[in-house]
Amino acid sequence: MKVHPRDAVKISAIQARTLSLNAGAGFQKPGGIGPDAVGNLVERIGFVQIDTISVVERAHHHIIASRLPGYKVEWLETAPVFEYWAHAAAYLPWKDFRHTLPRKERIRSAGHDWFRVEQAETERVMERIRAEGPLMARDFEAPRKTVGWWDWKPSKRALEYLFHAGELMALPRRGFQKVLDLTERVLAGAPPGTELRSPTPEEHAAWYVDRALDAWGIVALDEIAYQRREHVKLIERVLADGEDAGELGRIQVEGIPKTVYWARNSDVEKCDTPIHNGRELFILSPFDPFLIHRKRIRRLFNFDFTIECYVPEARRTFGYFALPLLRGTGFVGLLDAKADRPARTLLVNRIRYDGPARQKPVFDRALEKALERFAAFNGLETWKHREGK
């Protein structure tokens, strides 16, 4: 399907989903092995969220493994990525380093959005790191019990502020603990050619658009700068300029009449291209960057779920940690599973089938193969349905 500037292209919901999965997502035809392959993948999908939940393998490894066959967790340790903040703690590609600078500049100027720090404490923390080298939060005061996400001891708040403000950067973690050092010392080990110049507002807005299209293929205006604040008002101008240049086009998706989508004109023909590995079933992390914008997934894929680990057990409707199931052009269900590491078994607590998957035995076979792969990725020997479930 070819388009021209300002043509309003009308496509079906299935075509829109196909375009999204073929042009974005990173599921299609991954290549390479080792740390460099991880770096290439993170560059493709934009970021990999870091999360502490370990009922199955942690999200940052899960996201990569779902796209990179044969992935080994140690590859991430030396991959060409760095840690900062996307919509949450995340690994980012070094080519995007300069686009973290506007947020850092805002925080240095206006303070952090969620907590406050004392200048004397930030100066004390900086002095110790400057003199002693990389340190973790536990290297300062004795830990204490917190009563909320931001109820941190003063040194922890200072460390996080300095990290978000760009005065400190993270080195590879130790035992999942963040290790922080002076930014100039960390940048000394950055890949050659890493751009350290802050983008102009126009460049930053264009980066939002490029990043969204790289990851999702087709996007609506309210999806492009998800949970971002810097220079977002310029995004509409970027879209208009791209349309005038014949690079971007408007898309109308059947069944979603009040939403204008955008895609690269060079990608629109991918809405009719069969999906690679369309019969394979992917068990995804709920923190996957393809899923993280819940409104987008509900609107475009007619799929919804809740990460109920944050919900009191008595109020959960599905399970502790819902893992979305993707097959072909749609999400076909949810899986709640737990890695029983002493027994080397993946325990399947509950499965929800959605739509056609409820009545297709072939789906069961695809799920069995996916569970075998997922158990192996988790370092387990087998999987089984949990007794009484």
Image: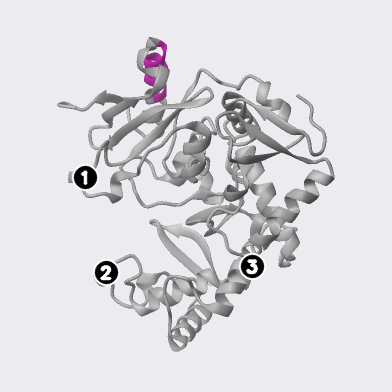
Name the residue tied to disc 3.
Answer: 102
Name the residue tied to disc 2.
Answer: 146
Depth order, front residue of 209/28: 209
Residue type, mark 1 in image: Arg
Residue visible at 67% across and 21% down? 272
Residue visible at 64% across and 30% down? 19
Dots 1, 3 in contact, CB < 8 A: no
Name the residue tied to disc 1.
Answer: 315
Mark 1 vs mark 2: in front = 1
Of the numbered discs 1 and 2, the one sitting upstream in the chain is 2
- Classify residue 65 as left or right of residue 378: right
Mark 3 → mark 2, Cα distance in angstroms: 31 Å
Residue type, mark 3 in image: Pro
Q: Residue 169 at what x, y percent from top left?
A: 55, 67
Task: Say whether residue 207 is magenta.
Answer: no
Mark 1 → mark 2, Cα distance in angstroms: 24 Å
Depth order, front residue of 30/220: 220
- Classify residue 222 as left or right of residue 72: right
- Secondary structure found at label 2: loop
